[in-house]
Amino acid sequence: MYSGREVTSKARVLEKPEPTYTEAARKNQIVGTVVLRAVFSLNGTVTNIHAVSGLPDGLTERAIAAAKQIRFVPATKDGRTVSQWMELQYNFNLY
């Protein structure tokens, strides 16, 4: 497992789906940012996702679900495909 500083080329995100609001979060007018830490694995899947900072009313869970759908090119180190830790941010705004 490598950080962004340890790889030759970082994982490159091709598609990052946006999470949707839950009804409860919309009703309670929850806004803010969910910060996640995840492994962008060498086999092309996002795994080991956990919240660094979350939001209530299901928004953290929606951000995690969106993160699982990210498409990316894996990181490389010295010509080999490797897994890399990355931090993700999802902003929730009503307007």
Image (spheres, helix red, strand yellow):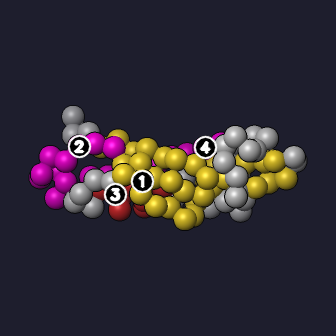
Place of residue 34 in the rendered image (x, y in percent of width and height, measured from the top left): 36, 49
| Mark with earlier residue (1, 2) | 2
Q: Nearer the viewer, mark 3 or mark 1?
A: 1
| Mark with earlier residue (2, 4) | 4
Q: Nearer the viewer, mark 1 or mark 2?
A: 1
58 lies left or right of 90: left
Q: Would you name the residue on which mark 4 appears?
A: 14
Three-letter code, disc 1: Val
Q: Would you name the residue on which mark 3 appears?
A: 60
Three-letter code, disc 3: Thr
| Mark with earlier residue (3, 1) | 1
Three-letter code, disc 2: Val
Residue 8 in the image: above or below residue 36: above
Q: Would you name the residue on which mark 1 appears?
A: 52
Q: Residue at x 61, y 53 (%)?
A: 85
Q: Secondary structure at mark 2?
A: loop
Q: What label sits on residue 31 in the rendered view?
A: 2
Residue 11 in the image: above or below residue 62: above
> Which of the two residues, 11 or 1, is positioned nearer the viewer here?
1
Magenta segment: does it hold 56?
Answer: no
Q: Nearer the viewer, mark 3 or mark 4?
A: 3
Q: Alpha-carbon distance for marks 4 and 1?
A: 23 Å
Q: Nearer the viewer, mark 2 or mark 4?
A: 2
Q: Alpha-carbon distance for marks 2 and 4?
A: 26 Å
| Mark with earlier residue (4, 1) | 4
For the magenta stretch, what is the residue range?
12-33
